[in-house]
Amino acid sequence: MICRMLQWAMEGQLDRHGAIQSPPLLRHVQHCPACSRWLQTHQQLQRRLQHPLPSPVSPARISRLQARLQQRLSEAGRIRKAPFRPAALQSAAAVLLLGAGIGLLYVYYAPTAPVSSGAADALQLITPAAGWQQIPQWAALSEQPLRTEVSNLAADARRAMQFLVTCLPAGGVPAGLSEAAAPD
Amino acid sequence: MNAFSAQSDQAVARAAAAGDRAAFDEIVRRYMRPLLEFAAAKTSVPNAEDIVQETFLRAYQNITAYSDRYTLKSWLFTIAWRQIISLYRKKQPDLLTDEPAWRPAESADPPDAEWLWAAARTMGQDYYTVLWLRYQQQMTTDEIAQVMRKSQIGVRVLLHRARKRLGQMIAQTTSIPIGRPRKSAAALAERTS
């Protein structure tokens, strides 16, 4: 049992330093025939495993692969710069969308919408509380489906813009960054 | 010979990260063969070529993420190892089992390196890989642990067991045929009858 533990320790030192460095371990090996035999076998095995094997790939094959790789690396180089272009396009589209949204809001909401007197009177009867003035605007809109549609579109544009502003990273997402970035 | 031939891996990697293409070419020149041999030892040569090509592409695209905490060698081998695992998952769940059942040649001579590696191949992927990285690539246990995403102790245990099993195989060379149980001579005879 003790010999096995010592062999484990010796193995660690052999793997790390290529030799047994601890004096107590060395003394043990000198006096223990089993461990001495184990060390001899271990070193023989190590020597044979370290012996270089014939390469399964010919130099010609390696040259061909290198040429192919050069070509793909050149393409990858171009791809690497590409993420900035979509990011710029997305930003431009977002700005245009925002501009259009603001324009639509201005066109449709700057002048106060006329309130249908009939609907306002009816609402006044049922909502006497403060803030009821807001409601007639909705009532007016409900009478004009086109405005409802436009206001919904404007709201969607605002939400989309807000999403883009909060979610997009500053420089775009570099291709392949999420994969094999580094051994972590 | 180029400007980077005499520089350390770390210096070359830094230059490549700064955008120097010649520096990356030097990395390719240094590690093309070891990576190709590593991948070819685990799969076929055409698959190995694809793996190596993909490894270098990924390394090129992510060279800025390379940290000096790791050796460039283990970083590249880590990417290659992931490519191999991914290939196993996609195409061939266990490429090693497709190898013909290997039997040791009966001989009074001590087994040579090729014999040992053929024997190691029958022991399973992890054992074979730790042995390969340790002895054919001279990696430390730390580096192997990083490449295989295992703990250092895990790698030491794998190495210990792999060497022990190899030792047993050497001892049994002349008596018991070595191979996967389901591909043993008895199983093959049963299938053919």
Image (spheres, coloured by chain):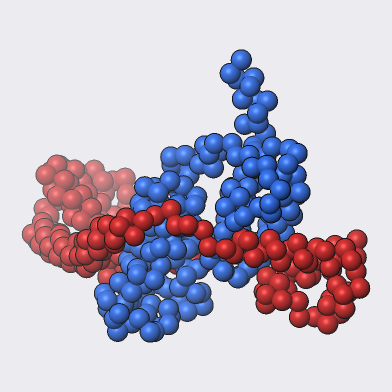
The image position of residue A44, as x and y in percent, is 70, 63
Residue A88 position by quadrant: bottom left
Q: Position of B51 compared to B118: left or right? A: left
Which residue occupies 73% across, 53% down?
B167
Q: Is residue B111 above or below residue B14?
A: above
In the picture, one chain is blue; tell me its letter: B
Which residue occupies 64% across, 19% down?
B190
Give the tally of numbered discs: 0
Residue A96 position by quadrant: bottom left
Extreme top residue here?
Answer: B193
Which residue occupies 84% across, 76% down?
A25
The image position of residue B102, as x and y in percent, is 60, 39
Q: Is residue A136 visible?
A: no
Q: Quadrant of the N terminus of chain A?
A: bottom right
Extreme front residue here?
Answer: B108
Q: Is residue A152 visible?
A: yes
In the picture, one chain is red; tell me its letter: A
The image position of residue A76, as x and y in percent, is 25, 62
Q: Position of A122 compared to B11: left or right? A: left
Q: Position of B27 compared to B145: left or right? A: left
Residue A43 position by quadrant: bottom right
Q: Is residue B54 above or below residue A122?
A: below
The image position of residue A13, as x and y in percent, is 73, 74
Which residue occupies 16% across, 63% down?
A89
**Frontmost residue, A89 versus B101:** B101
